[in-house]
Amino acid sequence: MVKGLYVHLPFCTKKCPYCHFFVIKDATSKKDQLLTALLDHHKTLHLPSSEIASLYFGGGTPTLFGLKRFETLLAAINPREEIEVTIEANPETITFDLMKGLRSLGINRVSIGVQSLIDLELKILGRTHTARESEIAVKAAAKAGFDNITIDLMMELPHQTLESFETTLDRALDLPITHLSLYNLTFEESTPFYRKRKQLQKACPSSSVGKEMLDLAIARIEGAGLKRYEISAFAKEGQEAVHNSRYWRGEPFEALGPSAFGYIDGRRFRNHRNFPKYIDAIKNGQSPIDFEETLLDNERINELLMVELRLFKGVDLDEFAKRHGPIPHKTHQSLDSLVKDGYLEENERIRLTERGRLFYDTVAEAII
């Protein structure tokens, strides 16, 4: 079975106050422990390079892991040259030498957490880089040989204005990028931002300004040659994210590292969201999984359909049923209602309309 492989490297110099991902403070000793655990865990997967369809190093800040450790880990995983191998990075960790080294190891795509190109907004987000450092980082990656560079931007931030967002877009689109992911700020539980959400939300743009921001972003980004192919993603032709597209299509992927999620044969699972527990489980030859569930067929199919509809090319329902199983009659009724109400359109494929893209949560709730 061909699978994607996600590797979670949780190290950060500082955790951003809006971040809900599993991260720990950067420490050499822990990086060495994790490398040993990842190598041992990888052996238990029995995943030959011929079965790896994509490889993604997420975090955390994976670029803190170090070139020598990446060299050792990649030698064990042994990804084929032709597959997409992505590494996430924060701008302040990027140097030309580091990126050149990573590129020489076979990593061919970099995802840089820019978020904003306005220093005040970066400070509000708790980021440890400046707008100028982001621009330098992207150009350093390109100079080092990366010709597939994606950046993350955020909108509807506290004290963000339409004008400041326009400045971010203009500066971002002057950079040598091939892909851009655009996200709304969300207030996730167990984060400092969530605890201060009432105060912060008062400073966020109104919903009408948020709609203007989205319209502006779509026009500017697509005008620069990056087509919107998923709710939050834009790419130059042929540069759509392979690994993330596998998630959206419900294709299988394995998981290495603490807190990493995997999905195989309808079974969803997560490794320990605790560094010592993950390390100890691997060291003692035990399963590192601390959560797993297998959804009932109808639930599984509805969830997979909901996620795949995020892709703007839509879903061929017959082909979908061959991959995942028959679509429940009740789900067909929900789809018919969504078409009638203008959220979906159906020709050879069923896809989101402009209204459905704007109110995707309504579509998702109706299907689930």
Image: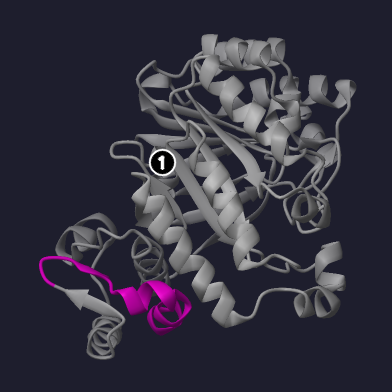
The answer to whether one can see residue 347 in this image is: yes
Query: Residue 154 appears at what percent x and percent y?
Result: 62, 57
Q: Is residue 351 magenta?
A: yes
Task: List the residue tagged with mark 1.
Answer: 241
Residue 298 quadrant: bottom left
The answer to whether one can see residue 90 in this image is: no
Q: Is residue 166 magenta?
A: no
Q: Is residue 339 left or right of residue 172?
A: left
Residue that appears at 48% across and 46% down? 180
Residue that appears at 36% across and 52% down? 222
Q: What is the magenta range?
A: 347-368
Q: Where is 313 relative to 40, above or below? A: below
Query: Residue 205 appears at what percent x and percent y?
Result: 66, 75
Q: Quadrant of the N terminus?
A: top left
Disc 1 residue type (three-letter) = Ala
Q: Is residue 123 left or right of residue 346?
A: right
Q: Quadrant of the C terminus?
A: bottom left
Residue that appears at 86% across and 42% down? 14
Q: Is residue 123 left or right of residue 55?
A: right
Q: Where is 54 relative to 307, above or below? A: above
Query: Residue 107 appears at what percent x and percent y?
Result: 51, 20
Query: Residue 283 appears at what percent x and percent y?
Result: 78, 27
Q: Secondary structure at mark 1?
A: loop
